[in-house]
Image: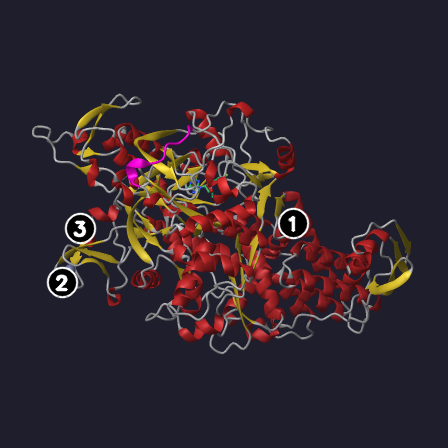
Amino acid sequence: MSYNSQKIEKKWQRVWKKTGIYQADLRRAKKPYYNLMMFPYPSAEGLHVGNVYAFTGSDIRGRFRRMQGYNVFEPIGFDAFGIHSENFAIKKGIHPKILIKRNIAHFRQQLKNLGCIFDWKRVVDTTNPNYYKWTQWLFLQLFKAGLAYRKKAPVDWCPSCKTVLADEQVIQGKCERCDSEVIQKDTEQWFLKITDYAEKLLKNLDWIDWSEKTKFTQKNWIGKSEGTEIKFPITELLRSKSEGEKEGEVLFDSDSQLPSVIAKVEKKESSSTSIDVFTTRPDTLFGCTYLVLAPEHPIINNLKYQTELPAGSEGEEENKFSSPISNLKFVEKYIEDSKKKTERERVSEVKEKTGVELKGIRAINPANNREISVWVADYVLYHYGTGAIMAVPAHDQRDLDFAEKYNLPVIEVIRPYFQTRAVAKSKSASLSFPPSSRKRDSVAEEEDLSSLPKKELPKRTPLVAFDGRLKKAYEGEGTLLNSGRFDGMKSETARDRITEWLSKKERAKKAVCYKLRDWLISRQRYWGAPIPIIYCEKCGIQAVPEKDLPVLLPFVKNFRPKGTGVSPLASFGKFVNTRCPKCKGFAKRETDVCDTFLDSSWYFLRYPSTDFDNKAFDKYLTKKWLPVDMYIGGQEHAVLHLMYSRFVTMALSSLKLIGFEEPFKKFRAHGLLTKNGVKMSKSKGNVVNPDDYYKKFGADTLRMYLMFIGPFSEGGDWQDKGIIGIKRFLDKVWSLKEKVKKGIQNQNLDILTSKTIKKVTGDLENLQYNTAVSALMILVNEMSKQSQLSIVNCELLLKLLAPFAPHLAEELWQGLKPGVRPLREFEIKDSIHSQPWPKYNPKLIKEKIIILVIQVNGKVRDKTEVKPDITEKKARELALSLEKIKKWIGGKKIKKTIFVRGKLINFVI
Ligand code: ANZ
Ligand code: ZN
């Protein structure tokens, strides 16, 4: 028998709304439970079935906790600023202010249809000035604490969105929003100092209860590396002079054939110039045969300085600067070219490495005092470590590829342990290098460079030339060779020893590096909260006074990004021109807007405090409701929103504005939905629109089907056949009401009912919704086989069903009550959703257990409780995991195992 889902669902949504059943009493709640789901951005296409999936999973959690007696607060809102909304507005030619209003209205309706326990009185819309006022306030708190700063830096620029992007918004070299290849651009931008919290962000992962995969992703993103920073002095400045090069002499660079001027080299103190590298393998230092700088490395510019121009050459660009780098033009061309590459291209394993030597300067390897060449190559990244590396081609594949290409020397300094013995036996044996090409260096290990007169640098034997036979770098551990006094030492030990040795000479220090970079938050776009900063020629960068917030986003008709590198707001004089808050003189506003991820980095703090206009969040309510008890959302936000929220919470905690440093006690990532095995996407035209299914089957069926599709943490595949199956199942539940009789007892169902309660309760606790639905199906099948059903049994079923199919459960529940009150007198306490969660009878489902005796060589050494039907394999695994048994076996080989089912297991050793 089919039921009318449309009628029932509309009816109960109306009744629930009227009674305000799902509005939490935030002040008086005794057992607060903050149940949060990631708020959607209201796209024009409407609610995505992926949203519905996440929201249903979260809502079931909220309803479950509610029936367990918690005061559940389950808010919803709209993350409505940002490039995505704006790009859509551009495409449709509708102003985002108008478009977003429309979209939010549509979303509200769709969300209401889903029947969640949302608290509609406390909705957050990030584009509402009473919200973004506080986003701006947050920015100012960070700014005043020194956690927001402006810097010129090479940043990722999306040529299609015409704005800069945060590191996290570049996915494999492409813009997260529009998929265009990202390029590098040098611009002034606002950053938030998330790196100040790198260690805490990492440390706290040890104890927060989050999905393992999310924690793993964050850990990798933070990317902590412990290693050594080593100083390589630069020498060539002096030597070039000593070699008699005259000031102003024009040299021809062999690579570029461009003349460059060498002048006044003595102006720079060569002794004060050195290059720091970061390495995790200081044990390989003796094998370092050249240095490589990232193209953005500042030393190239620092070595460049203004010369007094000879008369008549004024305005000629190439003569303005001079540098000890004799092929500067060529180098600068390389640097320019590398800017056009994406970071992905730069670090790609397969792409051929490119670079140029900095002719005219050299560095000294502090381990053996050898002069080595210095290169610029884009496989070294500016943002990591010190932006410079010591290249050890024998033990780093990237370096070897590079050395091979440019014919640079290779010195083996680590010999794998398994080969070491062979070497000891026959000294001449050399496995990775042809013996003929190997010469030991004379290592001047005790020499202290700084005490040596610069001109008398010891003459070096030429480095071993690579003859093309070493194809693969050995990157593992082993014994040191060609490393002076460290020869024969294990590489693991040598890392510390070499660091200590150089530390004494102040040539090295231990260092920790993080891959995490500061968060770039300025966007040269229109659709965002303006960054509340004023530039005054006299007073410099000024914060907008808090009393002047919000800095309203004006209605700018032409909101399209111009691609000029500035926001469209910049051409809106009324917005730009203002007064300096300090000197009251004429000043200009910052015209960049905040990244949307700043809006969403704190929205969970706002929900309980939406009633307040005079503060971002209320102290009392924040203390009472936060941190969030359960947060459910997508894994794709692992290094974006989830990282930013943690950072903002930590910063607010340091500023004593809140009393906790982690925003979400529990976080669970849900899986992804596919359709017939392929990812849903608009371009494939296979996106499921929930509206069609609300109409055809009802929200309850949709909810339940989505939860049945697969494990919630893994997602699953949408198939129309499947949803029909669930509709039939709910029809079957509907039909049960015909069988309910007063005074009936179904003792034969009691055991199964109790088992089902236990199963569903456990599954709901662990978000294993699909198996909970299966258990309900089994119970319903049994119930429909009965000719008559007791009220008690039906009540229990409906309570278990309530979180999944809230409308149907409510309707049937009301039908079970004899003499139900008319709807207009309906009270909150009458609702099935106000009933306590059912308890099972443990006596009915007690599983039998027996004692398994465990023997070693026939002597009883331990006992353990097991199920009577335990298999030999399981019993063996279990017994061998027990500490006592491990001790008795003591790692010896088990010769034989004797297993007597239900009694004992004996190991013969
Ligand atoms: C010498 C060396 C020898 C290295 C060797 C490795 C193997 P993780 O573990 O990721 O921290 N490196 C340092 N800074 C870099 C940069 N800005 N761009 C590209 N590569 C950089 O990696 C640390 C290692 O990555 C460092 O240790 C350095 O190469 C390289 F046999 O130094 B190593
Ligand atoms: Zn001023």
Residue 886 percent across, percent down from the top left: 78, 58
The image quadrant that residue 602 belongs to is bottom left
The residue at which mark 2 appears reads as 584
Q: What's the CA distance linking mark 3 and mark 2?
A: 18 Å
Residue 745 percent across, percent down from the top left: 82, 71
Looking at marks 2 and 1 on the same chain, the residue that comes earlier in the sequence is marked by 2
Q: Give the amino acid type for the residue marked by disc 1 in the picture.
A: Gly
Q: Give the amino acid type for the residue marked by disc 3 in the picture.
A: Gly
**Foreground tag (3 vs 2):** 2
Q: Is residue 22 left or right of residue 262?
A: right
Label 1 lies in ligand 1 vicinity (Cβ under 8 Å): no
Label 2 lies in ligand 2 vicinity (Cβ under 8 Å): yes
Looking at marks 3 and 2 on the same chain, the residue that comes earlier in the sequence is marked by 3
Say what secondary structure mark 1 lies in: loop
Residue 366 visible in the snapshot: yes
The residue at which mark 3 appears reads as 573
The residue at which mark 1 appears reads as 710
How many labels, in total?
3
Q: Is residue 397 above or below residue 536?
A: above
Residue 560 visible in the snapshot: no
